[in-house]
Amino acid sequence: MTAVSRRSLKIVGVAAAIGTLLLVLGLTLYYPAPVRFCACPIGPEFVVGNPAAGVCPSAGTFATTGCLAGDFVYNLTIEASTFNFGNVLFHVTSRNGTVVVATGGQPGFSILHTGGAVAADFPAPGGVLAMTSGWSYAPRTNSSTPLTSLYSILVDMGTSNPVERGYSFVEVGTGGAVGSSTLALP
């Protein structure tokens, strides 16, 4: 075999590999992963689940209930956690992966104690449902407080009903915690 034919064979091999890669990427983009309604972890250290859609109670305020009266909300349970409050940031994304910008009301994220009291909150500036910094803490709670199953996560989605829009809740490890995971919202 001549040097020219070996070079041609290598070029054909590289072109075939690139074509296969593009086909796989195209199929992945065309056929996205199935929607999951499960407990989804940042590793085994932080697992949330059971996203339940609802409406904030009529007397609700962001400071007292973690949401504004009449706003649409998602409540998520913390299934398992070895994290502290300061180890997680949250986002809500659309089907195409962009951050959701909620309209009206007072969108944001809150962590509620099992009794319903707000332990920490993050009002979303301009309705952009992406935490870029940490929480505002209630008394006796701080970034070192263990974030256990004694708490739940409440996402205030504003005044537009988010159900069946293909949104996802994204957990991002921070402050020494590594990784992220996504949970499809109903």
Image: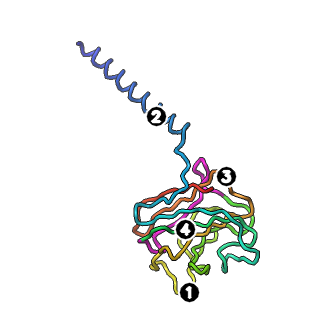
Q: Is residue 23 left or right of residue 101?
A: left
| Residue 98 within the magenta-colored segment of the rendering | yes
Which disc, if any, is residue 24? 2
Q: CA distance from mark 2 to mark 1?
A: 51 Å
From the viewer's perspective, is the residue at label 3 or at label 2 nearer?
3
Left or right placement of residue 18 versus residue 160 in this view: left
- Image position of 143 (left or right of 155): left
Q: Earlier in the sequence, mark 4 or mark 1?
A: 4
Q: Which residue corresponds to mark 4?
A: 77
Which one is in front in this view, the residue at disc 1 or the one at disc 3? 3
- Kindly state the secondary structure of the residue where label 1 is placed: loop
Distance from label 3 to label 2 (Cα)? 28 Å
* Rendered view: 86 above or below 140: above
Q: Mark 2–mark 4 contact, CB under 8 Å?
A: no
Q: Residues within 10 Å of mark 3 (few under 14, many from 20)?
A: few
Mark linked to residue 139: 1
For badge 3, the amino acid type reads: Glu
Rendered residue at 54%/38% (across/down): 31
Residue indicated by mark 3:
164
Which label's residue is closer to the chain start, 2 or 4? Answer: 2
